[in-house]
Amino acid sequence: MKRMIATALMAIAAQVPALALAASQAPGFYGAQLGDFKVTAISDGVAPRDVTTILSDAATTRAELRASHLRDTLALSINVYLVDTGRHRVLIDTGAGELFGATSGHLLANLAAAGFKPEQIDAILLTHIHGDHSGGLSIGGKMLFPNAQVYVDRREVARWINEPAPKATVGPYFEAGRIKYLPASGEVLPGITARSVPGHTPGHSAYQLESKGHRMLFWGDTVHVAEVQLAHPEITISYDDSQPLSRRRAPQAVRRSGGQRRSGGVAALFLPRPGPPAQGRWTRSAGSRLPTTTR
């Protein structure tokens, strides 16, 4: 598990000196410094899935998996990110909570192992309101982060708040008046801005951190399986709310992010399932302007 959540940080730190790995690490969490911000990747667990049945091109998916020496069924990591800005302690997403069974729901235990209590979290930024991103807000209808304001695109609340699972997890914060809608532009919190990237869900959002000129992008579910979708970002997933919109937007996002990496403008892209240590070295794929991974 330590390797799974550390991979993205290690790969990026090797390329971007601004991102320094923290000295104290442990299974379940991994930290790095970005300017004045401390960023900690925290594992909520995994969701085993046969990805050839949920990605839109089974043949290409299987071929890319075999090229990476992987089988059809992957343990997709469910990761949460804690950002300590010095003024705020912010979670980006909250994992699955009790929604996905015994293989996940480990956020609180790993948060404690990293040295933090739920009461210390004062802001939660949701990329969207799918269960593996918002399920850890509440257990049994009780808020787990009593001092946190939850920031989310208003279209997410309109779409999901009356569905059974979101009503039980997001609903307590909504009823308590602790939901704040993302601004149309500008900072959400000092050093943190939101970008609207609809397609996966109506209000799917990415977040960019910036400290001392160094930037890090958290792009939610733009990519689910890096070994497949970095080279073929037009491949969508069955969970996408709008397949046509995701098919148009994902290649743009991958291309733009690859360019930012090459220019040094973005320090990191955290993927939902961090891959092997070589992931994050981006090159031009043959016959394409899109970046892909090399091994």
Image (spheres, helix red, strand yellow):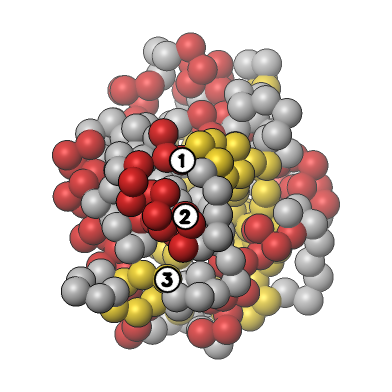
Pointer 2 and pointer 1: residues touching (CB < 8 Å)? Answer: yes
* Residue designated by label 1: 51
Reading the chain from its start, which is encountered first: label 3 or label 1?
1
* Residue shown at 41% from the left, 57% from the top: 64
* Residue shown at 31% from the left, 35% from the top: 240
- Per the model, the C-alpha gap separating discs 3 and 2 is 12 Å
Where 188 falls versus 285 (above or below)? Answer: above
* Residue designated by label 2: 65
Left or right for 125, reference 2: left
* Residue shown at 79% from the left, 57% from the top: 27
Q: Which labelled disc corresponds to residue 69?
A: none
Q: Residue 6: percent from the left, percent from the top? A: 66, 65
Q: State whether residue 12 appears in this view.
A: yes
- Per the model, the C-alpha gap separating discs 2 and 1 is 10 Å
Kindly state the secondary structure of the residue where label 3 is placed. strand
Left or right for 263, reference 16: left
Reading the chain from its start, which is encountered first: label 2 or label 1?
1
Characterize the local packing of mark 2: few (<14), some (14-19) or many (20 or more) Cα atoms within 10 angstroms.
many
Left or right for 92, reference 127: right
Q: Residue 244: percent from the left, percent from the top? A: 17, 39
* Residue shown at 51% from the left, 17% from the top: 165
Type of the residue with mark 1: Val
Q: Which labelled disc corresponds to residue 293?
A: 3
Pointer 3 and pointer 2: residues touching (CB < 8 Å)? Answer: no
Q: Residue 155: percent from the left, percent from the top? A: 28, 31
